[in-house]
Image: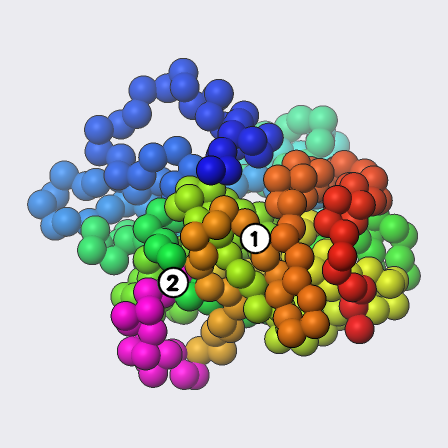
Amino acid sequence: MNSLNSINENSFISQWTRFFKRSPSQANKVHESDSELIKLPDGKDRFLAVTIDTVSEEIKAGVYKDPWLIGWISFMGALSDIAAVGADPVGVLVSITMPSGANKGYYEKIAKGMASASEKSEVFILGGDTNFGAETSVTICALGMVSEKEAMTRKGADVGDVLFATGKFGAGNALGFARMKGHPAAALFEDNFRPVAKLKQSALIRKFATTCMDTSDGLLAAMDQLSRINECGFKLLWNEQDILEHGALDLCRKAGLPGWLMLAGPLGEYELVFTIPESRLNEFTDQSKESGFIRIARTIKENEIILENPAASIILNTRLIRNAMNDPGDDFEKGIRQILKENKGWRYAR
C-alpha cells in the first residue's frame, strides 16, 4: 500500500495536526476532504463546510505577476474546495498581508480581481482583515452548507469506478513552466488563465459521486492522493487532445516535452475529479450530457497511476512527482529532469 505520509506535504500535515484535539462534530479525518465538514447542532442533518487557502509562494516566485489575477485566483481557489465537498457557498472572508508603503494601485487591482470572482461565482465577500508584513500574501476562508447525504469527501472509491473531470488540464502548469523558463508566451498564458470554481457542476456531481477532489495542486497530485486514501490505483486512458488544454499541449510540442508533464506540476485549474460507480454510470451520463465532463480513468486494484494508450503505457512514479514539484518556488527545471529520468518510456507530445 502506498503510504499517505510518503508525500512530504502529507507528512508535514500529519505531524502538525497530531498536536490538535479533533472536534467531535467534525465528520472528516485529516487528508480525507477538501473542506472541513462540521455537523451542525440544529437537527437538520447538514454540515458546515469550512476551508482556508493562501496564495503566497506563487507571488514570491513570480508565477503570478498580474495583481488582478492574484485576487481572482485566491477567491476561486478557496471556493473550489467548497465545490469539492458538494457544498453551496455562504460567503468568504479575506485576509491580506502587504508591505508597509506598498503601491496602493497594486492592491486595489487585487481587490478588483476578488470582486470580479465574487460577481462571477455569485458569492459575497463578508469581511476580513488587513495586515502589514515583508511580502504580499492573500488568504481566503470560504464557508458553505451541504446535507450529510450529499456531502462528498476523498474517501469512498471502489475498484471499477470511473474517474471523471469537469474540464481540461494544463493551463496553470503551462503558465508556471513558461514563467520559470522565461518563455515569451508567459504573459499570454497569464492573460488567459481564468480558472473558475465548479460550483454549479458540483450540485450535479454530489448526487452520484463516491469521491471528489479539486485539482488545485494538479491532476496527478489529485489522482495520487485519491489512490493513497482509497488504497487503489487509476488507469488513465491517455489522449492528449482530450485531456490537455490547447495552449498547454502546444507548449509541450514546441518545447519537446511529454504532454503528461502538464499534469504533474502544482499549479492546477480548480477542476473537480470524481468517481462514479459502475452501477450508476448510465444514469449519471444521461443527466450530465450537456456538462462537458471528461471520462479520464478507471479505478484499479493495484496502487499505481498508469497512463495508457494503444501504442504505449507507463506507470508513473507519482511520489517522486509530487515531492519534486510540491513548491512552485522550487527549481522547476531540476524537478522536471528528475521526473523525466524516473518516468522513462513515455513519448513526447505529438
* Horizontal side of residue 54 vs 170, given as left or right: left
Residue 69: x %, y % from top left = 67, 56
* Horizontal side of residue 259 vs 50, given as left or right: right
Q: Give the range drawn in magenta.
A: 275-290
138 or 281: which is nearer to us? 281
* Horizontal side of residue 148 vs 178, given as left or right: left
Q: Is the magenta stretch mostly helix, strand or loop?
A: helix
The mark found on residue 160 in the picture is 2
Judge the density around disc 1: few (<14), some (14-19), many (≥20) Cα neighbours within 10 Å: many
Q: Residue furthest top?
A: 19
Callout 1 amino acid: Ile
Quadrant in the picture for the C terminus: bottom right
Per the image, is 296 magenta? no
Q: What element carries label 1?
A: strand
Q: Residue drawn 49% across and 78% down?
A: 292
Counting residues from the N terminus, which is met first, the one under dot 2 or under dot 1? 2
Residue 52: x %, y % from top left = 46, 40
Per the image, is 283 magenta? yes
186 or 258: which is nearer to us? 258
Residue 201: x %, y % from top left = 41, 69
Q: Image quadrant of residue 249? A: bottom right
